Image (tube, rainbow, N blue to C red):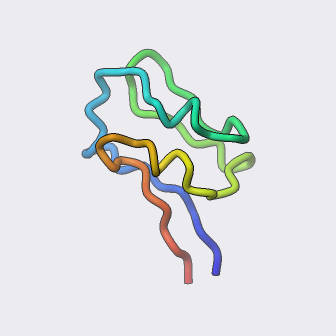
């Protein structure tokens, strides 16, 4: 079953440096200033490490059908 990382911007406070950016082992997340992170789907392996460190649960791994 495939998985895909999604950002729930409504959960992201966008007032801090996102800890998930540093947690990503393949550099698939980037953040400009304090905006919500952006996902590079070409790099993302949907491992879930970023989602596990997101303090507001704004990053989630969705299972695709």
Q: How many marks?
A: 0
Residue situated furthest top in the rendering: 33
In this rendering, the answer to whether 37 lies above or below 50 is above
Q: Quadrant of the C terminus?
A: bottom right
Q: Residue at left 34%, top 21%?
A: 16
Task: Give residue 34's quadrant in the image.
Answer: top left
Q: Residue at left 59%, top 69%?
A: 3
Residue 7 appears left or right of 38: left
- Residue 60 in picture, x, y percent from top left: 43, 57
Residue 43 appears left or right of 61: right
- Residue 4 in picture, x, y percent from top left: 57, 63
Pick whichever, 57 or 2, lies toward us.
57
- Residue 9 in picture, x, y percent from top left: 33, 43
Q: Residue at left 67%, top 50%?
A: 44
Residue 15 appears left or right of 20: left
Q: Residue at left 62%, top 40%?
A: 24
In this rendering, the answer to whether 8 lies above or below 1 is above
Pick whichever, 39 or 46, lies toward us.
46
In this rendering, the answer to whether 3 lies above or below 32 is below
In this rendering, the answer to whether 56 lies above or below 6 is above
- Residue 37 in picture, x, y percent from top left: 47, 34
Q: Quadrant of the N terminus?
A: bottom right
């Amino acid at each position: 079953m495939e998985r895909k990382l999604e950002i729930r911007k409504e959960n992201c406070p966008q007032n801090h440096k996102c800890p998930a950016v540093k947690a990503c082992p393949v550099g698939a997340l980037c953040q400009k200033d304090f905006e919500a992170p952006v996902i590079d789907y070409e790099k993302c392996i949907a491992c879930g490490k970023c989602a596990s460190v997101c303090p507001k649960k704004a990053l989630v791994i969705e299972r695709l059908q």
